[in-house]
Amino acid sequence: MTPTIVIVPGLGDSGPEHWQSLWTGKFGAARVQQDDPDRPTPETWSARLQEVIDATPGDLVLIGHSCGVLNIVHWARLTGGHPRVKGAMLVGPTDADRAFEEYPTVADMAPVPMQPLPFPALVVASENDPFASFERAQAFADAWDAEFISAGEAGHINVASGHGDWPDGEVLLSEALHAWTPPDIVRM
């Protein structure tokens, strides 16, 4: 059986044109919906992620974007992970350790955990992301013991940067699923 995808949005719940929202329908994914998607904290957002993991049967692959990446890494730090989580695709991680005038609540997710994740992970980062330098994203990947891929100059890899439907991301997801799942699993 193919793992179930769990979409982990960032601030604002990744609107309807965001690739995460489009993938939710396309792949029949579970989705983490925070009570307050504009006020992240490691504890409350991790608790909601845990609720979704507990309610979703079978093996899981987490797909986070922006503050959703921070949600996943804080959840892993707080819980030690879960045996059914087979991997995570971490796209456009936000650097909560620096100040963002337009998004001050991101600071509530600092400090960014810098320890290895208990499952395989892939960090996809842009070379011109306004919310994390390319070097910082690479440092996250190194600390998390994750694979690292450059998306080129892709902004924040969201709707504003032209990434509504994100076919290159689907290719990366397919490759990650192939790497993280045994050969007898049917792949998309």
Image (cartoon, rainbow, N blue to C red):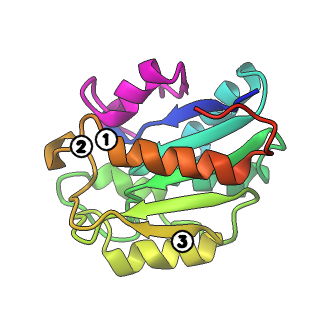
For the point 44% across and 67% down, the residue is 149
Residue tagged by mark 2?
163
Mark 2 surroundings: few (<14), some (14-19) or many (≥20) residues within 10 A: some
Q: Is residue 19 above or below residue 120?
A: above
Residue tagged by mark 1?
166
Marked residue nearer the N-terminal end (1 or 3): 3
What is the span of residues highlighted in magenta in the rendered image? Answer: 12-40
In x, y percent, where is residue 74? 61, 54
Front residue (pair 133, 165): 165
Q: Name the element at disc 1.
A: loop
In x, y percent, where is residue 54? 76, 26
Numbered mark located on residue 141 in the image: 3
Q: CA distance from mark 3 to mark 2?
A: 22 Å
Q: Name the element at disc 3.
A: helix
**Do the residues under discs 1 and 2 have CB atoms within 8 angstroms?**
yes
Q: Name the element at disc 2.
A: loop
Quarter of image, res 21: top left
Which part of the image, by quadrant, shows the C terminus? top right
Which mark lies nearer to you, 1 or 3? 1
Q: Is residue 180 above or below residue 8?
A: below
Task: Please tell me whether residue 154 belongs to the stretch shown in magenta.
Answer: no
Which mark lies nearer to you, 3 or 2? 2
Residue type at numbered disc 3: Ala
